[in-house]
Image (cartoon, coloured by chain):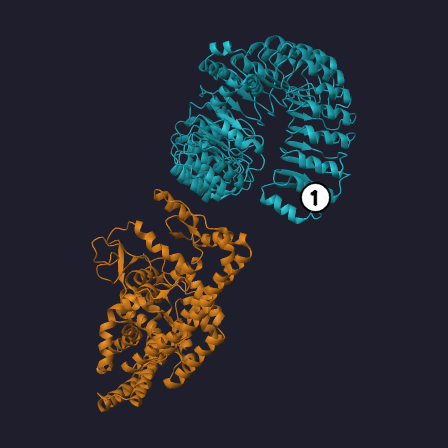
Chain colours: A orange, B cyan
Amino acid sequence: MDRKESLCTNTWTEPSSLTNCGNGLQTNLSSDPSISDYGERVEAPFKDFNQPSQMQSLLSKNVIKIADQENCPPSDSSQTSILQNWDASVMLNNLSFLEKKVHQLQELVCLIVSKKGQTFGQPNELLTQEQQLITADLTSIIVQLISSAGSLLPSARHTLTSTSPLVQQLCQLQGITVPFASGSGQSSVQPQNNGADKLSESSLKNGLPNNCDLEQKYNVEEHELKDEEDADDGENLLPGSYEILQLEKEEILAPHTHFCTICGKGFKRDANLRMHMRGHGDEYKTAAALAKPHKESESQPKLIKRYSCPYAGCKRNKDHKKFQPLKTILCVKNHYKRTHCDKNYTCSRCHIKKFSVMADLKTHEKHCGKDKWLCSCGTTFSRKDKLFGHIALFQGHTPAIPMEDNKRTTGLPDQDNSKAEVMSFSSGLNPSTENGVQNVMDVKGNIDDPITCFSPLNFEANFGGFNEFTQPQFDDGSEGSFSFLIPGSFKSGELSSSDNVV
Amino acid sequence: MSESLLCVLTEDLLVRVLHHLHSDADRKSWRLVCKHLNRVESLTRTTIRILRIEFLLALLHKFRNIQELDLSLCPRIDDGAVKVMLSQGSPGWTRGLKRLVLSRATGLGHSGLEQLVRACPLLEAVDVSHCWGFGDREAAAISCGTRLREVNMDKCLGVTDIGLARIAVGCSRLERLSLKWCFEISDLGVDLLCKKCFYLKVLDVSYLKVTSKSLRSIASLLNLEVLVMVGCSLVDDVGLRYLENGCPLLKTIDVSRCNCISSSGLISLVSGHVDLVQIAAGYCLSELSGPLVHCLKNLEQLSVIRIDGVQVSDFFLQTIGKNCKFIVELGLSKCIGVTNMGILHLVSGCGSLKILDLTCCRSITDAAISTIADTCPDLVCLRLESCDMVTENCIYHLGSSCLLLEELDLTDCSGINDIALKYLSGCSELVRLKLGLCTNISNIGLSQIAYNCRKMAELDLYRCVYIGDDGLAALASGCKKLMKLNVSYCNRITDKGMEYLSHLGELSELEMRGLSNVTSIGIKAVALSCKRLADLDLKHCEKIDDSGFWALAFYSQNLRQINLSNCNVSDVVLCLMMGNLKRLQDAKLVHLFKVTVKGMELALRACCGRIKKVKLHSSLRFLISSEILDTFQAQGCKVRWD
C-alpha cells in the first residue's frame, strides 16, 4: 500500500468503526457497501490502536462526565447534567429521550437507504455532499444516543466495566465517536468545515510560535525516547509475561493521534490538544478540563505491554525467532520509520545525510558542518571523544590538525553559503508541501471521504513539519556566525550541545 | 708536552683517563693541553651544550660523535637556524644523535622542529619543556620521531588532546613522558595515550585537569613504574582505587597537592602495591590516620617518603622507624606534630637515613638533632630551615659525626652563631650551605667554614648583616669552587669585598641585592674576572652607575640572566648592555628611573630575537610600540608586566 492510500485508510479508520457500533445498535447502517467494507477491514487495527492509550484511559473515566463535558450540544446539556445524580425520574426522562433519538435515527437511515437506491453506482459531487451531511447528522445522533445510554449505568459501572463486554464496547465507542460528533449537533457539515478551515488558518497565523514550541517540545521527548528503542534490548522479559500489541503500518505513519472534536485539528499529544481546546471557549478553560485525565486503575494489575513491528521478518516482529519487543509506541514509530521507510529528510547543509525521522535530522543538522574533529584517514567526527574512540580502534590512524590560516579566511564565506542554502531550501520546500496537500485532497475526493475536515489537518501537519525544518536551521546559522566572531566560543558551544545530546 | 709522553699514552689510554674527568673546567683544561688531547676529547665527547649560536656550526663540525645536543641555553634557535644547521653543517652530526634538548627554545616553530626530528634517525629523547608557545603542531612534529622513548613537554601550554594523540600514535615505544602543566590535556588524551603506549614506565601528569577516569586508563599500563600526579585536584579516592589493582610494577607515586584524595584512597593504593619504593603525599591530607600508618607498615621496600604539610603523630614516626628499615629519605617539611620524641623513635630504627627535611618543624630542639647526628652517620642532606631552637650544641654533633654531610639548610635559625659555624666546619664535604637570615654570624665564623669546607659550591648569606669584606676575602681564598653566592642585603660589603669575590673564577650566579656600599668599581672587578658569571641580580644597588654597567656590557659576555630593577642605568648604557650581551635571555627591567620610554624601546629592539623573557613596569604597557611587543610574541619572548 503506498502512502496516499495509507493516508486515506487512516482517515477512514475511525468513522468506519463508528459504523460498526451502529451495527451493534441494531441499526441498518451496513447497507452502505463502502463503509461496511472498510469497517470490517480496519476493525482489528482499530482495537490495537485504542488499547494502549485511549481505551486504557476511557475504561477508567467517568462516563457521565465525558458526556457532560464534551459531547452534548447546548440544548441537551441541562438534561445530561441532571443525569449525574441517579434518580428514577431522571432515568425515565433519559429513556424517553433515547426512544426519541432512536426514532430519529431510524428515519435518517431510511432516508439514506432511499437515496442510495437512487444514486448508487453513479456518484457525483452534489450527491457526495448530501451523503456527507447525512453521515454527519447520523454521527451526532449516535453519539448522543450512546452518551445518554451510558449515563443510565453509572451505579453498575464498577461491577460491569470489567466484566460486561457490552459496556466496554460502549465506552470504547464513545471514546471514538466523541471527536467526530461533538459541536456539530444537528447543523450541516459544510459550515462547520468552513469554520474549521478558518480556525486552522487563524491558528496558522497567530498560534504559530506556540505551535512551534509544542512541536519542539515533542521533539525533545521523542529524542529522549529514541535511545530507549536500543536500550530495551537488554530487557529480559519472559515471553508471555507481557502483552504484545502490533500496530499497522498506517497507524504508525499517521502524523497525529489526538484530534480536536470541534475543528478537527490533530495533535501528537493529548496535552497539546487540551491546550488547544482552550481556544474554543471558556468551558475548556476550567481546571478540570485542562487537568490531565488521571489514571485511577491502580488497583487493577496492569499487564506489561510491549509492541511488535508489523514488518514481517523484522527482528522486532513478533513472529521473528529472536523477537525483541519495542517498549513504547514512540519506539515503534521511530523504529518503523528508521528501518522500513525511505529516508526523505535530507540535510540541508551537507546534502548527503538522509533521515526518516525528523528528530534525527535535527540532531544531525545541529552538528553538521561542525565536524571539525578530523582523522588522518579523512573521516570527520562531530565529537572529540568519537574521534578518539576511532583512533584507539584503528592502528596507525591519528588526529589531523587543520591549517589554522585556512580556518580564519574561509570561515566567513562558509557561513554565507550555509545561509544561502537555507534560503533556497525553504523556498524550494513550499511547492513540495503544497503538492503533498494536493495529493491528499485528490485522494479524498476519489474515495468520497465524508469528513473533509481532515484536509486542513494534513496541511497543518505538513506546515508544522516545514516549521520544524527551518527553525533549527536559523538557529544553527546564527550560532555558527557567533562562533566565528569569537573563536573561543566555538568549542564551548560544541561541548554544551554535545552534552545536550548525551 | 713532549712527544715521548704521547707515545706512551696511546689514544685508548687517553680516552680512559678522560672518562674520569667530569667537571667542565677539568675538561677545558684537558683540551687546552695540546692539539692531540683536544682531538681525543672532541672525538670521544658525546654531549654538547651550545651556549652561543655563532659557534654552533663549528662545534657541530668538530664534535662528530655527539649523542646529545643541548640547545636549551642557546638564544635564537628558530626555524632558520635549524635550516642552516641541517643544510650547511657537516652532514654527519645528526646520524648518531639520540637526545635533543630544546627546553625553552621558544623561538622554534613546528616546521623547524619537524625537520630536526626527521633528520635524526636514532633520536630517542626530546625535551621541549617550557616552550610555552608549543601546541599540537609542534607535538605532531615530535611524533615524527618514531623511535622516541622519552619526551618531556612540561609547560607546552598549547598542547591539547590532539597533540598528545599524535605523539601517542606516532611514538608507540614511549617509555618516559612528562606532561606537567599541559593544561589543555584531558581524560580523553590520557586514555588514548594509555591505549597506544604500552611501554610507558614513567608518566608525569602533574597539574593536569584530569579526573579519576584517567587513573582508570593509567591503571592498565603494565610497565608503569613511576607515576607523578602533583596537583591533580580533580582526582579522588575512586581513582586511587583503580590504581590498587593496576600498574603491577609501580614503584614510585607522587600524589602531592591532590586535594580530593583522602586516607582511604591512599590505603587502597598502598595495599595494592606492597613493594612501593617512593611515596610523596605532601599537602593532600590533613593528617595521617591510624589505618594508613598501619598500612605503611607493610611497605618494607619503602625508601623515600615525603608527607609535607601533614599533621603527624609520634606513633607514625615510631611505626616508620620500626618497620621501614631502608628509609633513605624522609620529608617532614611543615609537618605539624613533629616532636623530639617522635624523631628519637624514628632514628632509632632508620640508621641509613640520608636525607631528612625538617623545614619549619619548630618544636625540634638540639636533643633531636644530636640524636640524628649520632645515629645517622650517612646523613647527606639536612634541612632545618626555621628550626629556631637549634643551637651550636647540636651542630657540634653534626660536625663531629656526619662527615658526609653535603647539604645543610640553616636558613632563619637564629640560634646559629660563629661557634656553631666553627663546629660545622668539621663537615668538610659540605657543598651547599644556607645561612640566610642567620643574623648572629660574622666574618669569623664564615672564615672557619671557608677554610675547611673547600668543596663549597653554593652559599647563601642572605641578610647576614654582620658579614663584611673580610668574610668574602676568606671565601675567595678558601672556596675556590664556589659557583653560587647570595650576599643580598649584607650591607657591610664594599667594593673591596667585590674585588675579593672577583677571584672566584667559577662563580656563575651572584645575587647582591641592595648592596648600598658597592659602586661601579666593585662591579667592574667582578665583570672583568668572573668570566663564567651567568646570573646577576643587582636590584637596588643604587650606587652603581653607568661605568659599572658598561663594564658588564663588555666583559660579562656569558650573562644569561640579569636583574637591573631600581638601578641607575641610563638609556645609552642600557641599550649597550641589551645589544652587547649576546647570551642574555632573561632581563628584569623594572623601575629604571633614568631610562626613558624611547630608551627602553631601543634597548628592547637591541635584544629582540635573543631574549626569551623580559619583565617591564606595567606603565610601559601602552607606551611601548605594539610592533615591538608583537615581534617579541612572534619570537617566543614572554613579557611580564609588573
Q: Is residue A85 above or below residue B581?
A: below
Mark 1 falls on what kind of element? Answer: helix
> Residue B59: image x %, image y %?
53, 29
The reply, left or right, for residue B597 in relation to residue B534 is right
Q: Is residue A281 visible?
A: no
Q: Quadrant of residue B532?
A: top right
Position in image of residue B94 (x %, y %): 45, 32
Residue nearest the observer in this picture, A92 or B306: B306
Which residue is more in the foreground, A143 or B268?
B268
Identify the residue at horizontal 41%, vertical 74% (top origin): A430
Q: Position of residue A211 (x, y in %)?
A: 46, 70
User: Is residue A345 visible in the rendered structure shown here?
Assistant: yes
User: In this picture, is A424 found above or below B390?
Assistant: below
**Residue type (three-letter) at the residue carrying disc 1:** Glu
* Residue under label 1: B601
Q: Residue at x 21, y 59 (%)?
A: A313
**In the image: residue A17, left or right of residue B155:** left
- Give the side of residue B586 with respect to residue B293, left or right: right
Q: Quadrant of the C terminus of chain B?
A: top right
Tag count in the figure?
1
